[in-house]
Structure formats: C-alpha cells, structure tokens
Amino acid sequence: MDLLSNAITVSSPEEPKTPESQSAFLWLLAHFIALHKAKKLQTLHSRYLRTLYLLLCISSNQIREYFVSGSRGSSGDREADDIAQEILPPYVSDSLISLNEKDEISGLLERFTT
C-alpha cells in the first residue's frame, strides 16, 4: 500500500476534465479503498490517509454531483436514461459509502492512534 500511495501522491493528480477520465479516477479511488480493506493492516500509515484525502478532495465535486443527481432522480423530474448515466457504478458507490460506516471510521481512528 505504501508504494501505491507514494505513486499516487508523487504524480500530483489533478481534477479530471473529461467524463472518461472522471470515471477512471473514481474507479482508482474505489480500488484504492478496496485494496486497503483487503490488506487489513494492523497499523495505519499516514501516507494512506494523505493519499485518501488527496483522492477524495480531487473527486469531491464529482462525487457530490453523483449523489445529488441520484437523489434527484428518485423525485421523477428526469428521464430514467439520463439518471442511469449519472449514477455511480455499484462497486464505486459501495467503496465510497463504506468509508462512512461507523466501524470503518472507528477502525481508521483506532489504528491511526496505536
């Protein structure tokens, strides 16, 4: 994880401009989260947190748009095809939502302080 974190932060990623690069960036973020969870590291390195923070900051506007458009879609004011194109893929959405789970937050804080 350290090598991956280092590779991401050293390259100084910028906010993606095209829809294809935005999608690819969100997939990178989702895979980064999933890889960290799969490793189940006992200690949490600040490099992981820095990289996660960087990736979330860069993609925050895009993530916000997806979640807002998804919630607007349920109100029925847009066609289903338009909404389907703007909804995050389940893998990406699940990875992002998993960061918000109580156990995940508690685990991150616990491992970071030990």
Image (cartoon, rainbow, N blue to C red):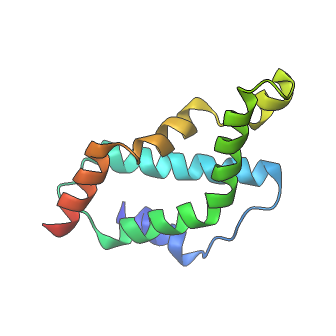
Q: Is residue 94 left or right of residue 57?
A: left
Above/below status of 9 relative to 89: below
Does residue 76 sit above or below 5 in this rendering?
above
Quarter of the image with the N terminus is bottom left
Residue drawn at point x = 24 percent, y = 52 percent: 106
Drawn side of residue 22 relative to residue 82, left or right: left
Q: Position of residue 104 (x, y in %)?
A: 30, 47
Is residue 24 visible in the rendered structure shown here? yes
In this orientation, which residue lies closer to the viewer: 84 or 51?
84
Report which quarter residue 58 is drawn in: bottom right
Quadrant housing the C terminus: bottom left
What percent of the width, then of the height, locates residue 111?
19, 60
Q: Quadrant of residue 79?
A: top right
**Above or below, comparing residue 86 to residue 43 in the picture:** above
Q: Nearer the viewer, residue 19 or 81?
A: 81
Q: Residue furthest left?
A: 114
- Total numbered labels: 0
Work out whether residue 87 can be spotted. Answer: no
Q: From the top left corner, tell me how far across and down residue 11 is, in percent.
A: 59, 74
Which residue is drawn at the image coordinates 38% and 66% (left, top)? 49
Q: Residue at x 26, y 44 (%)?
A: 103
Q: Position of residue 75 (x, y in %)?
A: 74, 27
Residue at 50 percent of width and 45 percent of height? 96
